């Protein structure tokens, strides 16, 4: 039963990540504005959701007995709160930077960390591209005068 709940958490984290990325692409700035506060808030929420989604994935794999992270002095799994803290820290560092090396992915965790880092690098590009392409596609309010 516990394994089924963990697998459900993994599936939910993948769905949350996908929905967040879809939300970033679908939410466009208000007309006639290239920079939108709403767009920045959506970007921050997407980053937070992807970070937590991957964190849930790391926690679920650790609870299933698949070692995905290794700390310099061993990953402290004696306390669930400490495990959550370590996993969310690693997820944030992997998503926002290249990593510090204090917590190291191992096994399948390396592949998951690579995908997460790739998403972390592509999110700002997707933000900029969707903002400018959406702005250029709108008809001009003031038609060109001949």
Image (tube, rainbow, N blue to C red):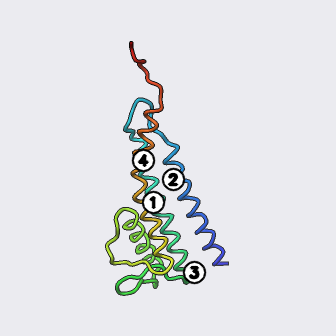
Is 67 on the left-hand or right-hand side of 40? right
Q: Secondary structure at mark 4?
A: helix
Residue projecting furthest to the bottom? 73
Which of the pair 136/22 is nearer the observer?
Answer: 136
Viewport quadrant of the C terminus? top left
Location of mark 1 (residue): 119
Residue at the disc numbered 3: 64
- Of mark 3 and mark 4, the one earlier in the sequence is 3
Tell me which residue sits at (47%, 64%) in the image.
52
Using a 10 Å C-alpha cutoff, classify the residue at mark 4 as few (fewer than 14 neighbours), some (14 to 19) or many (20 or more): some
Looking at the image, which residue is at 38% across and 36% down? 34
Q: Nearer the viewer, mark 2 or mark 3?
A: 2
Quadrant of the image for the N terminus? Answer: bottom right
Q: Earlier in the sequence, mark 2 or mark 1?
A: 2
Badge 1 vs badge 3, beta-carbon distance below 8 Å: no
Q: Position of residue 59 (x, y in %)?
A: 51, 74
Label 2: few (<14), some or many (≥20) within 10 Å?
A: many
Which residue carries the number 4 mark?
127
Q: Nearer the viewer, mark 2 or mark 1?
A: 1
Q: Which residue is mark 2?
A: 21
* Residue 16 coordinates in the image, percent (x, y): 55, 58
Q: Are marks 2 and 1 in contact (CB under 8 Å)?
A: yes
Q: Is residue 41 above or below residue 83?
A: above
């Amino acid at each position: 039963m516990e394994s089924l709940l963990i697998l459900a958490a993994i599936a939910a984290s993948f769905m949350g990540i996908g929905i967040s990325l879809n939300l970033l692409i679908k939410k466009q700035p208000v007309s006639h504005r290239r920079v939108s506060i709403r767009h920045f808030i959506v970007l921050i929420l997407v980053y937070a959701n992807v970070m937590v989604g991957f964190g849930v994935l790391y926690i679920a794999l650790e609870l299933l007995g698949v070692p995905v992270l290794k700390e310099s002095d061993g990953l402290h799994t004696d306390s669930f709160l400490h495990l959550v803290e370590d996993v969310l820290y690693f997820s944030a560092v992997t998503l926002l930077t290249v990593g510090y090396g204090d917590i190291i992915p191992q096994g399948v965790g390396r592949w998951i960390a690579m995908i997460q880092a790739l998403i972390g690098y592509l999110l700002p590009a997707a933000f900029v591209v969707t903002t400018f392409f959406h702005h250029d596609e709108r008809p001009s309010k003031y038609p060109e005068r001949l």
